[in-house]
Amino acid sequence: MNSLLLQTRNSRIAMKMRGVCLPPVPSTSRTSFAEFSVRERMREKLKAARVRIFFFMQSEDESRQMQEDESQMSSRVKFRDSVKKLKQKSHVQTDFPSAEEAYNFFTFNFDLEPENMKDETKSKKKSESNQEEEEGKEQESIDEEDCLVNDREDLFIMDQMACDFLVVKPADYKSYSERLQKEREILFTPSILTVPMSQKVPENMQPRYLEDEGLYTGERPIVSLSNQNILENRMLRQEQGKRWFGDDGKLLALPSPIKQSSTRPPIFSLEEGIEPELETLYRKAMKPMHANQYIVGSGDPQGQFQLDIDISGLIFTHHPCFSREHVLAAKLAQLYDQYLARRQQNLTKLLTDKLHALRNAVQSSLDNSGTNFKFIHIYIYRQTRRLRDAEQEKDRTLLKTIIKVWKEMKSLRDFQKFTNTPMKLYLRKEEVDQRSDKKIYEAEIQAEINELLEEYMEEYEKKMEEYKTELQEWKSWKKAQKTKKKKKIKQSQDQEEEEAENSEYGEEPVKPIPPKLADSLEVEQQVREKAINIRRKPGEPVLIPELSLTESVTPNDLCPRAEVLRREDVKKRSVFLKILFNTKEVSRTITRQISSDFRVHFGQIFNLKIFNWPESLKLQIYETVGFSSTNLLAEMFIPVPETTVLTGRARTEEIEFSSNQRVMLDHEGVGSGVPFSFEADGSNKITLMTSGKVSNSVSWAIGENGVPLIPLVSQQKTGIPSALKNIDAVASIGTSGLTDMKKLAKWAAETKLDPNDPKNADLMQLIMVATSGDACVPGFFRLEQLQQEFNFALDEELNRSKRFQLLQLRHREVAEFRNYKQVPLLEREITEKLFENYEKRLHERDVIDSKDHLDAHRALVAKYLQKVRESVINRFLTAKHHFLLSDLVNEEEVPSLGNLGLSLFKLAEPKRPLKPRRKERKKVTAQKLSDGDINLLVNIIRAYDIPVRKPVLSKLQQPSRSSRSFNEMFAASPSPQSPTHSIDWTFNQVLVHPFVEVSFQRTVCRTTTAEGPNPNWNEELELPFRAPNGDYSTTSLQSVKDEVFINIFDEVLYDVLEDDCERGSGIHTRIERHWLGSVRIPFSTIYFQTRIDGTFKIDIPPVLLGYSKEKNLGNERGYDSVRSPSEGSYITVFITIEPQLIPGDPVREKLYYLLKFDTQEDEKLLQAAEKYQAECALKFPSRQCLTTVVDINGKTVFITRYIKPLNPPQELLNGHPNNSQAAAELVARYVSLIPFLPDSVSFAGICDLWSTSDQFLDLLAGDEEEHAVLLCNYFLSMGKKAWLIIGNSIPEGTTAYVLTWEQNQYVIWNPSNGRCYGQFDTFCPLQSVGCLISFDNIWFNIQQYDSPVRINFDISKPKFWKSFFSQSLPYPGLSSVQPEELIYQHIDKAAALELQGRIEKILKEKIMEWRPRHLTRWNRYCTSTLRHFLPLLEQFQGKAVEEDHQAELQKQLGDYRVSGFPIHMPFSEVKPLIEAVHSTGVHTIDVSNAEFALAVYVHAYPKNVLSVWIYIASLVRNR
Amino acid sequence: MAAAAATPTVFLLMVNGQIESAQFPEFDELYCKYCFAYGHDWAPTTGLEEGISQITSKNRDAQQALVWNFPIDITFKSTNPSGWPQIVVSVYGPDLFGNDVVRGYGAVHVPFTPGSHRRTIPMFVPESTSKLQKITSWLMGRHPEFTDPKVVAQGEGREGK
């Protein structure tokens, strides 16, 4: 019992607790809480609490009565006591709460309910007076306090046992069947049985199978039958369940969205075995034969199709803002239009005329021809008459309606007392001649009457026939009747009478009625009546309505308010049209206000350049009211014009539109879709919809040359237009490129394409057209059809923009703009000048300028070279943007173990060693540099064997020949020089005072003057270097073409004292400098070599007037004796760049890497070559090893293909038929005469391009390797053993020489100057030998040394030479890239002569130009003498003529002091010649009476190889 | 090359701000360098184009930020928004053996809109190409570096293969 009670209590507690937890009910007082101050709130709360406690106590007494019956626990009693105490205290009512009260207030858990509280306070006040009420209240409070008490109580009950709270019960369990039972009551389980068809289709209906009817039904998604049944059963149970079912009794379903094949490309992972047929194969890219293959059509660039849409205006036939008058006016206008149209057609007149003609025809046919015609004529005639009558009637009624509407309008205007529309109808009366008119009218009527009568007669006759037969039948019937009913004869007679009365209806079951003959009067009546109805009365004037817009519209201030409002509203409205092409908006008209007559004029023509076939053209009319948003009024489709509709011929058409919008307006406007009436009482309501007409015309535009801009396919007029449309549609559905229609059709058949599927409609149509065989498919597909739409500006605009052009050119790294900074912001700031150079260059590319070149052929070659260069540079530029890791990241090499040890050892090294080692200079990356940062350091150390001055008055000597012949050189040992010199020569020797002048980029530095033929300067000269355009990038530096000229001069002091008597008092001398020779070193060589250190042969002219270079045999010091076998003078220099620049070698590698793939060589060979090279590089990294080279087309070619015997020009061989040595020398000279053009300069140091010998000869320019290859080939053809040497030389760096085996010794030929050296010649410029190349093999030098003096050239020894082709890799017999034979043109002497003259002229002009402050006198006599010498010099190749020559000159010009020399150069351009002459400084002589002599000789060799001799001399008269 | 007009129209971009702090949880005693990378049409008119900061130590608080508060003040003029300046920051610090080693490279465009902006630049350094390289570079104190810190502001040569 107890426990049970407790349980209920517990649950009560829970309930109470829950109640407490609930958010308090919002109440009126609660909402105003915020207004109270905190204190007030407290006070109120307190009050409430006090009241509550009071009640609590009060009720406690009563509840105690009840509870006392029950057995109570001591604890409760205790609690009650405390409560009692509380109660007693609470009786003391004070305004401020006691401490206990306060405590209770804060600890008690009251649920503040102000409404309740109010009641309670009220009741409290009344409690004494009104007992009854209190009792009623009590009930409430009991409930509440009961809870509260329980709450209290249970919270304090602590000493109860756990078992007091627990009730143990068995778990609830319902048996399975029971549960099923219950579930069945609640749940509905649809059955899986098939639903009978009858339930699914509407009652009394047969299922209808659309598919059987040929309509397309998509494929339904697969659902298992049971599921489907369940669903159907379920659906049927629902209300209106049947609407889920289609006509065929199946559930409605969309076609299955699952595609048959996957649209995502399958992923092939590399790990898994790829099927062989799917494996990707590498194929070399093929060069297309025709580059413009992809250009669509030839003369038919895209976007040439144009539709012209002319939107002239818009007229509303109804608009919500129409006033009633407008409605009438619109109606009137419409009627009038109709009238006008009718009048234009003039059907009545036409038919009347026809009628007349027919009438005549009938007449004539009646007269003569047969009946057949007559019937036909009559038939047609009657038809026509009927038509005419109808037309006439229409005309008449139209006229009447017009007048009626006009009258209505007039009355309306009168009624509303204002005029809204300028519409005014005039009725023009055309008076007619009454009498003639009447006559015609009468005649007409008569004719008609007659005709009608005739007609009726015919009819009557026909009917009569019928009647007679019927009568016969009737009579027979009657007879039978008579026998039966004789008594009824009388009756029958009555019937007869009736019959007579009856009209034409002869189908009486009784006796047929004989047809009545038409009464002519009656007919006349009829005709006249009709005529009155449909025809003008005779004499009545012809009424011609004329609608004009002349009525003045009542101004606003005279109108009633409603009308003013309407007009205002109209003003606020504006309209514009959107043009949608293939449902895409292409343009829109300007927004125009609706005028008061509801016409909108646009008058705009839109030219649509179209790409896609026009599927649809749509106009959308939008209306804007005030500033609110626009709303779509109506849409209308414009038909795409026929291909014959061209601009200019297209007619303006009016297309009607209407909108179903409902508009109600609060002013005079009648609204749209709203009924309104003209009557005052509101009857006769009409409802009008917004409608109107757009006048427009659409046509195909005509191009400038009169060609219509219609898509090509449609011009060919094959197939129906819709089919053509679909041809392009193929492209649009994504199967572009499907051109084989037959295949497509086959595919469609194979895949069982559903022809009814709307998705395939386009395709099916296409296939139909295709299989019919006359379709033409565009032979292209468009890659980016929508590109145009994303272009923000037209291409032309972009092209026109100079700024954009500038940006583009800079981006392309065009030379002129490569580093252009700060492209101007505004177009106008870009001057034309900027582009001048570039455009000039572009222009010049095609125009051959013969001015600079003097020779058309060379000009052509120069152009060609320029082009090759450009292409190579472009290639290079792409390579430049291709970075290797090492270009971006500096990473220390992994040190080898030895290195690591060494570096560890280094740690122990002293920080500042006593003997510091030379450290490598730090390399500088080029881009950080600017002008003035780079200097060229030239250290001139010493020179040997400088020519010495000849004593002017010394007797002529017969010195030995300064140089030896070829034969002499190969002599086993140099023959001892015959001591022809007298001893006194040595002593008489006039000293030379040489100094060196280095000029670079027109900056000149000179050393001090030294003395003697073997001077020692040891001076460092510093020349600033300036890169072109301030561009210090690697590319730019590589392309620097400047050369360092090292000129050796002799400083001569001349005594210029006129008078001997002054000699004692003063010295007056003039310093002259005489050019002795020069050394030229291209900057590119210095750049790539980083330093040049060596002894160079000074280029000394073969004849130096006033100087002689004698062998100092009298000076038998050891040094000179060593050098004695050599000829010429030498200078030792050291050149470097400070700071050290990093040469662009990585670029070379990269380009090589890029180009490597572009080859026709066998893959295996290339691999072998790479391996070979790698092996060689590993052993001797510094030695050159070449296996493959890049040809002029940028392809990699195996090097041995270049070596092949080739015939030298026959003329050269003929010169020395017996002397092979001389011939060889001549050939070498010939080769050296081909101008030298280093690749590193022309191709910016990217790579060596090897041209074949014929290309080389055609170009007449090349660098060492071309010369070497040609020379080697010539030697091979001459039956020598010859190899190409790849090695290092001074000053060229990496170079190619030729090695021959002659007379038991190896000879090294320098192909660029034609000189030859024995293997043991110390002055051979070749410093090291990397490899030897023959036509069938490559040998790499694996000897310890690489200097030619110290190595063994016997290639048969594998110990010394590592061969590329060996037993393991036999020579595969590579075909040569060289031509079979070289063809030489004959020598063109006339051209050479002409060139000679021109060069001479130019040089003379130049010299005069260089001496602006002096008079330049030309000594003709000397010139002619010199000219005489030059051919001799050429003949002897500059050798062996010196002395004779000098003697002769001396003889002829005895009283002149002559200083001068011949310069010999291969001819390429004039500029180098000028440069060479300038560098000698002959012109610098400033003796006032100096004269000059200049002679030029051009010797032509086969193939236009020209050798140029320039003899320049200055003459000073001796006193 | 001289500009086309005597007074070419340019727009100016004034940048001032500071490199405030960095988070390099593993390193301490770092300093940073900054420079600007910009296109052809940009030229600095005033201010310092590059700078090198003081060495800073880690904050002792939980954030352990390295605070430089290193000011940047530069004005560019330009004719073309293309090549908008990027500030390239590289951070260096001593390694275990006291060698100065690069600890991070990073670049960010100067903000395109006026106003105060705060940018956080993720920093990175190139990795050694191999394990062995890594060890040796650690030993030698020669970690891989970019040839030019501006590499991080350019796309060239960093295309994925």
Image: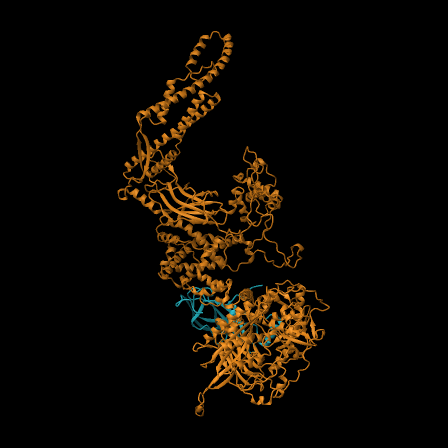
Chain colours: A orange, B cyan
Towards the viewer: A1471 or A69: A1471
Where is residue B39 shown, x and y percent of the image?
A: 47, 67
Where is residue A19 shown, x and y percent of the image?
A: 46, 54
Question: Eyeballing the image, is A489 above or below A1309?
Answer: above
Q: Is residue A584 left or right of residue A975?
A: left
Q: Residue furthest right?
A: A1367
Q: Quick check: can you spot residue B120?
A: no
What is the count of numbered marks? 0
Q: Is residue B104 left or right of residue A396?
A: right
Where is residue A88 shown, x and y percent of the image?
A: 40, 59
Question: Eyeballing the image, is A610 above or below A863?
Answer: above
Q: Quick check: can you spot residue A329?
A: yes
Q: Residue furthest bottom?
A: A1064
Q: Is residue A741 left or right of residue A357?
A: right
Towards the viewer: A483 or A1275: A1275
Q: Which image quadrant for residue A1367?
A: bottom right
Question: Eyeballing the image, is A461 above or below A545?
Answer: above
Q: Residue furthest front?
A: A1452
Towards the viewer: A1138 or A480: A1138
Identify the residue at horizontal 41%, vertical 21% (top origin). A451
